Amino acid sequence: MADWKKSRNYDDWPGCRRCVHLTREGSCIAFPEMIPMPIASGAVDHMVERPGQVGDTLFEAGLNEVTNG
């Protein structure tokens, strides 16, 4: 069941800005409207499924349009 607790992999999560799914609009595949504040602020990671996400897409490290400017 999805919740808002830090996952056991929290320390390995570099944040949304390092995810290939992040858009300039502050959304992603899992959260097409807007990434929830607990994730966007870094209070919790997105290494596990979270409440309200669409599908099962999680953080995926890599370059994207945001980090490439």
Image: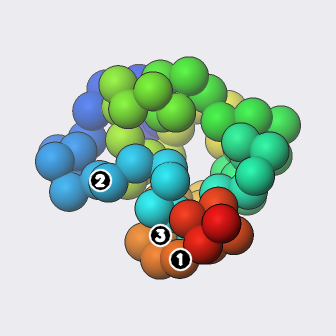
Evaluate whether residue 21 shows in this view. Answer: no
Amino acid residing under circle 1: Leu
Q: Which residue was labeled with disc 1?
A: 63
Task: Identify whether 45 is placed above or below 23.
Answer: above
Q: Give residue 51's position: percent from left, percent from top.
A: 58, 31
Residue at the image position 65 percent from the left and 66 percent from the top: 69
Q: Is residue 3 left or right of residue 29?
A: left
Residue marked by disc 3: 60
- What residue do we see at 23% from left, 45% from top? 10
Q: How far apart are labels 3 and 1 at the CA level?
A: 10 Å
**Are discs 3 and 2 less than 8 Å apart at CB?**
no
Give residue 13's mark.
2
First reached walking from the N terminus: tag 2 or tag 1: 2
Q: Is residue 25 left or right of residue 5?
A: right
Quadrant for residue 67, please give it: bottom right
x and y percent of residue 23 in the render?
Answer: 73, 56
Q: Amino acid at mark 2?
A: Trp
Label 2, label 1: how many angstroms apart (C-alpha)? 15 Å
